[in-house]
Amino acid sequence: MLDIEPRGETTVVRVIGECDFGSRDALTRTLAEVAATGVPRVIVSLDACEYIDSSIVTALLQYRNKLRERFVLGVPEDRRSIHRILAVLGLHATLDVRPAV
């Protein structure tokens, strides 16, 4: 499930629950729609997300490459399984992971 929250010059896309291959298309579609608005900053928040798989990591990388400095990934410290996946792949810096949004 995804929640979109406009905050002035920022749009927060909050991922809720488990996010895997079955939800990849919805995430990709949502990120494309948000990116098309031209909003200066897009935050993908995983504060309510329990799990991501490699297909979601790939989608996040695609939008990080597309949006560049406009993209931020919010992953709270208590989401250890998500941090572990990103650490194993060496993607914390690439995805501009921040602890809170």
Image (cartoon, grey):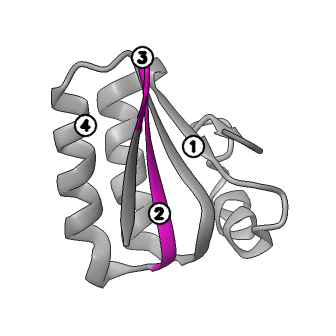
Whether residue 72 sits left or right of residue 57 in the image: it is: right
Distance (Cα) linking label 1 and label 3: 16 Å
Secondary structure mostly taken by the magenta-highlighted segment of the chain: strand
Distance (Cα) linking label 1 and label 4: 14 Å
Residue under label 2: 15
Residue under label 3: 9
Residue under label 1: 73
Q: In terms of sequence position, does the residue under pointer 1 or pointer 2 come before the other?
A: 2
Q: Are marks 2 and 4 in contact (CB under 8 Å)?
A: no
Q: Position of residue 43 (x, y in %)?
A: 50, 37
Q: In terms of sequence position, does the residue under pointer 1 or pointer 4 come before the other?
A: 4
> Hey, what amino acid is under mark 1?
Leu
> Hey, what amino acid is under mark 3?
Glu
Name the mark nearer the viewer: 3 or 4: 3
Taking the magenta stretch, the answer to whether it contains residue 2 is no
Distance (Cα) linking label 1 and label 2: 11 Å
> Hey, what amino acid is under mark 2?
Val
Give the secondary structure at mark 4: helix
Q: Residue at x 23, y 19 (%)?
A: 38
- Quadrant location of the C terminus in the rendered image: top right
Give the secondary structure at mark 1: strand
Q: Which residues fall within the magenta stretch?
A: 6-18
Residue under label 4: 34
